[in-house]
Image (cartoon, rainbow, N blue to C red):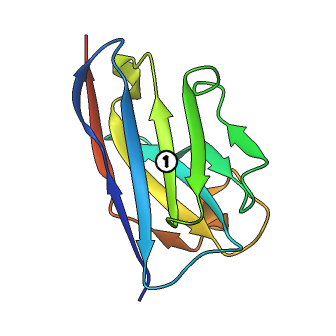
Amino acid sequence: QVQLVESGGGLVQAGDSLRLSCAPSGRTFSSSAMGWFRQAPGKEREFVAAITWSGRSTYYADFAKGRFTISRDNAKNTVYLQMNSLKPEDTARYYCAVRTAIDAGTRHDLYDYWGQGTQVTVSS
């Protein structure tokens, strides 16, 4: 059973920063793309960012460009999401996901494994 554990969420004020981490367990995803998605109450899950297994290609939702940075450390089998200049509309539960393929994608149904999420709340 593959497990993904997210951490780093919390309650912050607008303009603050957070760094989310995701550490898969049960196996090493040495040739897998990883992504971050988020879901707010009453809304559908939406794409945030993704990174290929090599880390050389990254993809971002429009709202994340210039503010969020996805990265990975394959030696630690961990993916990160650095979030700067947070806004109240960023409030959501953030999920990491693994796609068992080299290429990344922006559709949630392309990903095979999911974590339980970590809550990010941004106050105004």
Please identify the quarter of the rendering in which residue 30 is found: bottom right
Give whichever of 86, 92 is nearer the camera.
86
Residue 73, image x, y percentages: 57, 57
Residue 25, image x, y percentages: 41, 78
Q: Residue furthest left?
A: 11
Please give the name of the residue rendered at 71% of the width and 74% of the height, measured from the top-left corner. Answer: 31
Q: Is residue 45 left or right of residue 13?
A: right
Please give the name of the residue rendered at 28% of the width and 41% of the height, measured from the top-left corner. Answer: 9
Mark 1 surroundings within 10 Å by alpha-carbon count, few (fewer than 14), some (14 through 19), many (20 or more): many
Give whichever of 83, 48 is nearer the camera.
83
Relative to 53, say whether 42 is above or below.
Answer: above
Residue 76, image x, y percentages: 49, 65
Question: Does any portion of residue 45 appear in the rendered image?
Answer: no
Relative to 73, say whether 64 is above or below.
Answer: above
Q: Provide the residue designation for mark 1.
A: 80
Q: Is residue 58 left or right of residue 20?
A: right
Q: Is residue 122 left or right of residue 102?
A: left
Image quadrant occupied by the N terminus = bottom left
Please give the name of the residue rendered at 64% of the width and 24% of the height, measured from the top-left corner. Answer: 65
Give whichever of 54, 13 is nearer the camera.
54
Relative to 124, say whether 58 is above or below.
Answer: below
Q: Residue furthest bottom?
A: 1
